[in-house]
Amino acid sequence: MLSFVALIAFVTQDLSILVKYAGIVGLVCMGWAAILSGVLLRGGEIRANYATESNEDREKRFRWANNFFIIGLPNIIAAVVVYILVLARLAEIAAY
């Protein structure tokens, strides 16, 4: 996904496309990873899930959370790096 968006952004010479879509994909994937891993739950909810969930289901849920995290992290990094580079370039242009 990231390479496809990067290709479109470089062909159209509009890096804001890369920042926008890579950022959105990254944030959505990170949100799903947080939901699936249970980091947004309170202690009682975590204990209830632990008591009613089988080890196999828990491992499957954590595997999905890990996959979403692995997909989201490079997208967020790419969006931040390109955003910083674009800002640096704009500051360079404004200095002239």
Image (cartoon, helix red, strand yellow):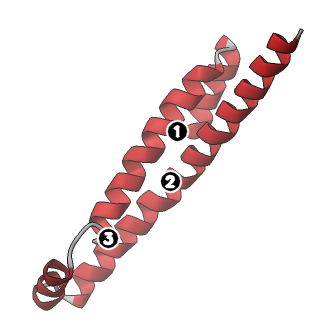
Measuring 56% from the left and 22% from the top, which residue is drawn there? 17
Of label 2 and label 3, which has the lower sequence position? 3
Q: Amino acid at mark 2?
A: Ile
Q: Amino acid at mark 3?
A: Val
Q: Is residue 11 left or right of residue 59?
A: right
Looking at the image, how many numbered discs can be counted on the residues? 3
Measuring 78% from the left and 27% from the top, which residue is drawn there? 88
Horizontal and vertical percent position of residue 60: 30, 75
- Give yes or no for contact between labels 2 and 1 (Cβ–Cβ under 8 Å): yes
Q: CA distance from mark 2 to mark 1?
A: 9 Å
Badge 1: few (under 14), some or many (20 or more) residues near its Cα, within 10 Å? Answer: few
Horizontal and vertical percent position of residue 66: 44, 68
Q: Label 3 belongs to which residue?
A: 39
Q: Label 1 belongs to which residue?
A: 1
Q: Label 2 belongs to which residue?
A: 71
- Give yes or no for contact between labels 2 and 3 (Cβ–Cβ under 8 Å): no
Badge 2: few (under 14), some or many (20 or more) residues near its Cα, within 10 Å? Answer: some
Q: Helix, strand or loop at disc 1?
A: loop
